């Protein structure tokens, strides 16, 4: 094996690229911060939050984020822990959704699902989980806030299995909860970890480790009054639950479960170490011609996110690419199969919040931001030898729709340009009515995107965009058996066309569509233009 190939193989092996999914307030920011803290990427707890606050304070077009106190855009963070390179893909942690959130999951090799011990599986987690499942992504579960009174851990496991339909196998088990939360018993390594200190991150965490079976006298002694309930629960689990199976974890059929408290640090390190040990490294991504070997194939990457005008001082546009194979070096000349052009990747950056640092070299699993003069689109492939073409990205069905009030727009050209740019970024989807030549309807996964759209159209394109709410809540792409007459005379639906001129049915309710399909059994509807894309973007490995 050549030295470069060996280096690439080594670098891939030590990389973990993942996203954390959760419902707002479950503790994603806190856990992210703690992981970065362990990795030495931030010096003190509170830094991620502070950085977000700073970004809110300084970023111009993200004014809307500041107004609402939320993060609309997602970025990438990285850290090193024990020789492992950690890439955390940040997804927005608020109630609203954008396609951006979903697409970020397409760039991850695994996912950490964070659950609030008092609340269990919440709606947003469920939705994000669905996307992970469609991709067959390995999912690791961290049950957070064990330092507070929460629900019975056995109940929580039952809920994960029932609601999400995935087998939940506790790798470690909480010893006590609320004020009595004192440690975790590691079922795989057969050891007890008892915590002290931590003090909500303010003081150093003390960890005592004792090896042995859960009912060994020294372990029982260390668990104190929690010994009986812990032993009982573990006995029950040993008898009833399945056992940890790495192949099933990698296939996304089983989720290893960890208990802890991100705030007090209790259980974070054991979770992180297990996750880094058993979490997958970057694997083969699927291209139009089959899986792309990350080591043997020269540099290849796909664009999963584009963000324009991030920095108000520089009218720049950054394309976030996930490297899939080979080695990226600054100045590399890559082919861009969609246009047939060659592009010199001279200016790249790693982003951490608003801080940027130049990137000279990067490997599969890494995400780099490329300054883009306007050539790249979401879903595009870049590759050294011109042979690779990653399959297109799935579009997600919007759930909110607005009519664009064209009559009120003075600057038509600027409007078209702005809409094109924001569609390319994947913020919104445009549709046109059958008799219109340009977009008449705009759809988004989350309604906040309309505010972002209006704000950005005004700030960047000087267009006052007027949008009128439409009462549709569902968009479906007919796949077979469709005749426009089926929806022509109904006020409950509207037939529109997407930017690739595919027919799309907008409906006021799913129930209406169900009755339509009941009346026309030959009609097949999909919630994305090409429903097989999800499976195809994921390696069979
Ligand atoms: P998010 O990104 O998922 O939205 O959640 P975030 O980390 O911002 O946490 C939401 C709230 O939950 C924060 O409290 C945070 O301190 C708290 N929290 C996170 N992890 C734990 C935990 O393990 N135990 C307990 N008890 N609380 C936790 P806040 O009061 O909303 O904000 P702050 O004033 O602490 O910043």
Image (tube, rainbow, N blue to C red):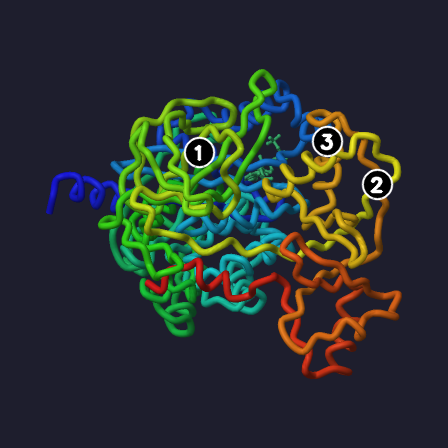
Depth-wise, is mark 2 or mark 1 nearer the camera? Answer: 2
Total marks in image: 3
Depth check, front residue: 137 or 324: 324
- Distance, label 2 to label 1, CA atoms, is 40 Å
Residue that appears at 49% across and 42% down: 261
Residue 414 tag number: 3
Beta carbon of the mark 1 residue lies under 8 A of ligand 1: no
**Residue, far left:** 1
Residue tagged 1: 77
Quarter-of-image position of residue 145: top right
Does the CB distance between marks 2 and 1 fall below 8 Å?
A: no
Depth check, front residue: 339 or 533: 339
Marks 2 and 1, the one that precedes in the sequence: 1
Q: Quadrant of the C terminus?
A: bottom left
Does the CB distance between marks 3 and 2 fall below 8 Å?
A: no
* Quarter, ligand 1: top right
Residue that appears at 18% across and 40% down: 7
Quarter-of-image position of residue 384: top left
Depth-wise, is mark 1 or mark 3 nearer the camera? Answer: 3
Marks 3 and 2, the one that precedes in the sequence: 2
Q: Would residue 454 be seen by someone viewing this image from the given angle?
A: yes
- Distance, label 3 to label 2, CA atoms, is 12 Å
Q: Position of residue 39 (x, y in %)?
A: 35, 32
Residue that appears at 29% across and 45% down: 385
Residue tagged 2: 406
Depth check, front residue: 130 or 436: 436
Q: Secondary structure at mark 1?
A: strand
Pointer 3 local density, CA inside 10 Å: few below 14, some 14–19, many at least 20: some
Pointer 2 local density, CA inside 10 Å: few below 14, some 14–19, many at least 20: some
């Amino acid at each position: 094996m050549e030295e470069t190939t060996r280096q690439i193989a080594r670098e891939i092996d030590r990389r973990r690229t993942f996203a954390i999914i959760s419902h707002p307030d479950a503790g994603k920011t806190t856990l992210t911060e703690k992981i970065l803290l362990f990795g030495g990427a931030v010096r003190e707890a509170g830094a991620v939050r502070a950085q977000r606050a700073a970004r809110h304070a300084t970023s111009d077009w993200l004014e809307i984020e500041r107004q609402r106190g939320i993060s609309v855009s997602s970025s990438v963070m990285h850290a090193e822990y024990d020789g492992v390179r950690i890439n955390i893909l940040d997804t927005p942690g608020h109630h609203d959704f954008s396609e951006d959130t979903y697409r970020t999951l397409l760039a991850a090799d695994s996912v950490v699902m964070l659950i609030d011990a008092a609340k269990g599986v919440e709606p947003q987690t469920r939705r994000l989980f669905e996307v992970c499942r469609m991709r067959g992504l390995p999912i690791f579960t961290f049950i957070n806030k064990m330092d507070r009174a929460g629900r019975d851990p056995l109940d929580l496991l039952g809920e994960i299995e029932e609601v999400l339909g995935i087998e939940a196998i506790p790798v470690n088990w909480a010893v006590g909860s609320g004020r009595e939360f004192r440690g975790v018993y590691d079922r795989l390594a057969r050891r007890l970890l008892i915590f002290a200190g931590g003090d909500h991150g303010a003081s150093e965490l003390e960890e005592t480790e004792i090896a042995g079976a859960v009912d060994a006298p020294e372990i029982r002694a260390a668990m104190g009054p929690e010994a009986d309930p812990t032993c009982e629960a573990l006995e029950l689990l040993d008898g009833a639950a399945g056992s940890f199976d790495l192949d099933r974890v990698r296939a996304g059929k089983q989720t290893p479960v960890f208990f802890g408290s991100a705030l007090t640090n209790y259980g974070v390190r054991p979770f992180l170490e297990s996750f880094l040990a058993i979490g997958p490294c970057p694997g083969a991504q699927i291209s139009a011609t089959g899986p792309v070997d990350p080591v043997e194939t020269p540099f290849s990457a796909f664009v999963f996110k584009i963000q324009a005008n991030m920095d108000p001082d520089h009218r720049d546009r950054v394309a976030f690419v996930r490297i899939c194979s080979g080695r990226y070096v600054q100045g590399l000349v890559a082919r861009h199969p969609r246009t047939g052009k060659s592009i010199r990747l001279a200016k790249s950056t790693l982003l951490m919040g608003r801080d940027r640092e130049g990137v000279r070299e990067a490997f599969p699993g890494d995400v780099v931001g490329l300054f883009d003069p306007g050539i790249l689109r979401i879903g595009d492939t870049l590759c050294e030898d011109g042979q690779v073409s990653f399959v297109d990205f799935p579009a997600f069905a919007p759930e909110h729709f607005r009519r664009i009030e064209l009559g009120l727009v003075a600057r038509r050209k600027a409007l078209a340009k702005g809409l094109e740019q924001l569609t390319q970024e994947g913020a919104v989807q445009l549709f046109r009515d059958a008799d219109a030549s340009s977009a008449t309807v705009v759809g988004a996964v989350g309604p906040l995107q309309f505010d972002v759209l209006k704000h950005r159209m005004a700030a960047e394109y000087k267009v006052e965009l007027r949008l009128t709410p439409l009462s549709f809540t569902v968009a479906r792409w007919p796949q077979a058996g469709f005749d426009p007459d089926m929806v022509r005379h109904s006020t409950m639906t509207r037939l529109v066309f997407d930017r690739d001129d595919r027919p799309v049915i907008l409906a006021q309710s799913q129930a209406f569509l169900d009755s339509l399909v009941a009346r026309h059994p030959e009609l097949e509807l999909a919630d994305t233009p090409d429903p097989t894309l999800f499976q195809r973007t994921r390696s069979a490995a």
